[in-house]
Amino acid sequence: MNLKPLTIAIAGLLSMGSIFSSNASETSPANAQLLDQLKKQLETQQIQIEALIKKVERNELKVKSTDEKIEATVTAIEDNLSSSVNSKTTIGGYGELHYNNIEDKESIDFHRFVLFFAHEFTDSIRLFSELELEHAFSGEGKPGEVELEQAYIEMDLTESTTMKTGVFLIPVGITNETHEPPTFYGVERNPVEKNIIPATWWEAGAGFNTRFSDGLSADFAIHSGLNVPTDGSKAFLIRSGRQKVAKANADSLAYTARIKYTAMLGLELAATYQIQTDVSQGALGADANLFSAHVTYSNNGFGVRALYAAWNISGSEAALVGRDSQEGFYIEPSYRINDKFGLFARYNAWDNNAGDADETEMKQTNVGLNYWPHEDVVFKIDIENRFGAQDGSGFNLGVGYQF
């Protein structure tokens, strides 16, 4: 409240009282009496005005204090809303429970429980991480493991090029980078990408992604490599060579390059080539090369996935056990009936002993149904038949989610 006009008016009244007082002796008795009354009235008004000023000042202070409190409250609410709506830290995850009944061997397993954590430091610098518990219970003598699958910093170098450093998934195959349960058919992940690629596969290093144009991109990464056993029943088995960046031997690095095309709606074409400078990490000097190519296509509910992957490993030691060559492929047609139900069939064939003259190729078919009560929740059932160098038949049930 502005007190300046009131102050000026009071000063004027007081000045008038002073003038009247100084000239009282020069007036008539009647005028002197009148002036005396006016003087008393002015003195009374002065007291009232001073009391009013104090009251107004007190009220002004209260108003100011209330305004400050309201302003502070509004600021806190705005900060809280900003923090909630524009949070730079996000949490997600996925999980899946499986029931398997193959050749009368029954098991139930909460196969994976995964949490994602991401944070945006700036518009061009981000953190991505993934923590996973496999088989529900880890520890000495227990079937489970706690694993750090991803933990990397991603930076935008230009509008079309990004760089990431840390622990990340290798850019290869269909399911290695995208394997949340609602995104694929069948209870279990396909055995070709599991045993040949081998998904899920992560390493530590640096990677680059460049988008040349709409729908055409390339990836290149320098990272830690596999360290396969060189003797025993698991000698040169690719899946057994994953070090999972756990005090990993880094004597020999690996290099991965991928080209991917997605310009046509519903279509993805990709090919990956990887060089392992020594897949035994100095034990034998055995270099290895991986080639993988895949296609996915969907249109009006109909879909198909197909993938081929092959390893070539140098050295007589790998050839001696028939594992200098390892390869596999699968094809998976599907039909999405509506947004709730989908049918699929998959034929898998792979051989981790393809360099051997013996018949060691494993084959497997899966036919089943997915039901999505929500786009991020899925129930699955499939019939499985194993043949070739393996036997067994039965069925699988599963439930999975992502958020």
Image (tube, grey):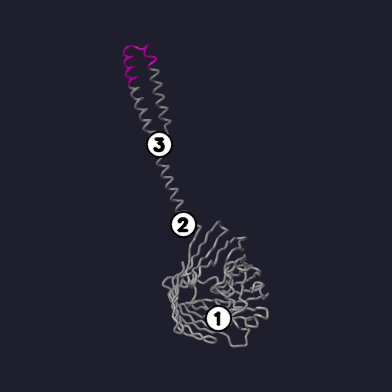
Would residue 257 be found to the left or right of residue 331 on screen? right
Above or below, comparing residue 378 to residue 72 in the picture? below
Q: Residue 56 is drawn in which quadrant?
A: top left
Disc 1 designates what residue? 330
Residues packed near mark 3 inside 10 Å, few (<14), some (14 to 19) or many (20 plus) = few
Q: Earlier in the sequence, mark 1 or mark 3?
A: 3
Residues packed near mark 1 inside 10 Å, few (<14), some (14 to 19) or many (20 plus) = many
Residue beneath the point at 39% across and 39% down = 63
Q: How far apart, in angstroms, are the residues tagged by discs 1 and 2?
A: 44 Å
Can you tell which mark lies on residue 136? none
Q: Position of residue 62 (x, y in %)?
A: 39, 38
Magenta residues, dominant SS class: helix
Q: Earlier in the sequence, mark 3 or mark 2?
A: 3
Q: Residue 269 is drawn in which quadrant?
A: bottom right
Would residue 402 be found to the left or right of residue 216 on screen? left
Disc 3 designates what residue? 61
Q: Is residue 154 visible?
A: yes
Disc 2 designates what residue? 85
Above or below, comparing residue 27 to residue 246 in the picture? above
Q: Position of residue 336 (x, y in %)?
A: 46, 77
Residue type at tag 3: Leu
Residue type at tag 2: Val
Q: Secondary structure at mark 2?
A: helix
| Magenta-drawn stretch contains 25 | yes
Q: How far apart, in angstroms, are the residues tagged by discs 3 and 2?
A: 36 Å
The boundaries of the magenta stretch are 21-40
